Structure formats: structure tokens, C-alpha cells
Image (tube, rainbow, N blue to C red):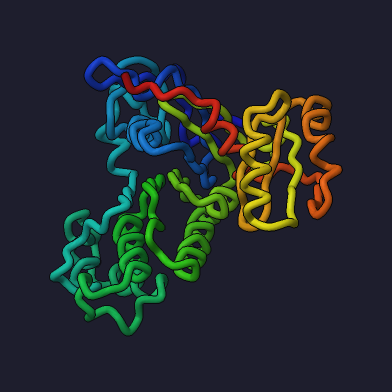
Amino acid sequence: MNGSDIAIDVHGLTKKFDGRAVVRNLSMQVKRGSIYGFLGPNGSGKTTTIRMLCGLLTPDEGTGTCLGYDILTETDKIKTQVGYMTQRFSLYEDLSVRENLEFIGRIYGIAQPVAAARAAIERLGLTGRENQIAGELSGGWKQRLALGACTLPSPQLLLLDEPTAGVDPKARREFWNEIHALAANGLTVLVSTHYMDEAERCHEIAYIAYGELLVHGTVDQVIASSHLTTYIVSGGQDGNLNALSEQLTGMPGIDMVAPFGTSLHVSGRDAAKLDAAIAPYRKRKGLDWQRSEPSLEDVFIDLMRRSQDNFP
């Protein structure tokens, strides 16, 4: 990649609050026009990382660029190119959809705010709701309105902080279809999410736990780098699986046991040791053991289990 292909390029970022490192020595690159997903436990530093990457928060250590601008000395230039959509709806609930968008257009000095608002309404499927009061919209429609507002000034970088929390699956899917359409037109997107299906829709993902970047890359690369071997165990009564989970948890060679519906996922990073550990249990009647590729959720559960909380 040459410089023009990279939207974000940072090295050694560290941020402390009250003496505690919320982010430690983080380095990464994000390609222009890509959707980059951040995952990790609550309090792991995802939001702090995103804010440092785009110049909204100054790191205590480290260097880098965002959209070609220095994240330490040119933050004002970066901010004019960034759209930020928070988890909480932050527009005016007593204004209509149209009034909110026209107001945003005027705030950003858009030449024709009324026309820009009308175009956003049509693009996001809000036609027919333009005069509805924003506070009366459902979660999914509020989400569309918020997306329209933060993309109205045509930013080069879009920040989404858990944007679909509490939104129904249909609205989430429609939202992600729009995000992919925006990325296809060159917009770079950084998104934090807890949903595995959303992570799988990102071009690249990063897992951050308690201030440290543990793994990043495409979904396939992240799964491969885990070196996990996984067995799916099904059959028997739920009580039998619960008892089996308790028996397997913590055994040498078994790194993770996690229930998934009416089955268990049993994983280990050493395939030979895992096979040896589960061998006696595979002889039990009524249980079906199937070797499977680890899922992204398997990988993240394992990463979370191995992460050490940095809170004193």
C-alpha cells in the first residue's frame, strides 16, 4: 500500500487516565474505504482508541496520521473530515426528521441545506417520515436519522460507537447495507460492536482487551491466528451438558468450554492435548462429538478469558 491508500497509520499510542493505562502501545493501519471493526469487553479501551485515531483525544505517547494529518498537531483539520455516531441518540428529539437534518446542514455550512436534507431523506428511506418528530421514532428509524446527520457533511471518516445496540435484526441489517454502500464510495468506517455477525461484515477487525491490541486482520486471519481446535458436543439432556461443561472446564488441554444453545463448544490450542483430554468423554452414550472450525465467537471468548483486567 502507498500512503494514499492508508486512512489511519499510528504507532505506539498510549493513553492514561488517573495513572491507569487505558490504551497501551497500540499500533495499526486502516485502509481507505474499508470498514474496520473494534471488539472487546466493556472498558477495554475501544472508544478511547477510536477517539485517539481520529484526533478527538490526544495520546500521552505515540505518533501517527489520520487522513494524512498528524494526530498530534493537526487535529482541527481531522475533525472537519469526521462524522461521529454515538450509541445514544444525540439529535434534537423535539424537532422533525427534516428539521434535524436541515439544522445539521446549516451548522456545517452546507451550501443548500434544504436540498441536502431532502437527498439524505431519500437515500436513507426516510421519505414519508420527514415531518415526524424525532423523539417519536423507533430505535431503527432513529438510527437511520443519526446516520444521515453524521454523513450529511460528506466526511472522509465515519466513527460508529456501538451504533446498533438495542435495534432489531432487520433494522441492523438495513443499517449495515447502507454502511457497505458508503464504504464502496470511499468512506472509511471505524465501528465498535459486540455483535459477532456485525464483526463478520467488517473488512478487518481488531480485538482490544484492557488497553492492549491482541489481534487484528480479516476475520479468516483472526480465526487462523487463534490456533484453536473446536469440537461441538450435542445430545443428551441439558443437565447432562451442564455437568459435562463443569467436568471439562479447566482440564489440561482444554482452553475453553462454552454453551451455544443446546450444544457445547470445547476448544484447545493444542489439538493433540485436546483430543487426549476429551477421549474418555467421547465414549459416553447419547453425546455426539463433531470437530468443527472455530467460530469468531469461539476466538473472542478465548481471548477474553485469557485477558487480564488492568483496573487496579
Name, please, the residue furthest toward the bottom: 128
| Image: 123 above or below 191 | below
Q: Report the residue that reaches farthest toward the left.
A: 94
Q: Is residue 222 visible?
A: no
Q: Nearer the viewer, residue 79 or 203?
A: 203
35 horizontally vs 24: left or right = right
Residue 262 image position (x, y, % from top left): 65, 57
Q: Position of residue 86 (x, y in %)?
A: 30, 50
In front: 17, or 121?
A: 17
Taking the spot 28% from the left edge, 39% from the top edge, the residue there is 79
Quadrant that contains the N terminus: top right
Q: Position of residue 188 (x, y in %)?
A: 47, 46
Picture quadrant where residue 53 is located: top left
Give the residue at the far right of this rendering.
Answer: 283
Q: Is residue 84 visible?
A: yes
Residue at 38% over, 38% down: 42
Q: How many marks?
A: 0
Instruction: Locate residue 116 relative to residue 239 in the image: left or right.
Output: left
Placement of 137 over or under 300, stated as above or below: below
Q: Residue at x 59, y 46 (%)?
A: 203
Residue at figure coordinates x 42%, y 27% from the top left:
210
Residue 68, above or below 91 = above
Of 116 and 213, nearer the camera is: 213
Q: Position of residue 243 (x, y in %)?
A: 64, 44
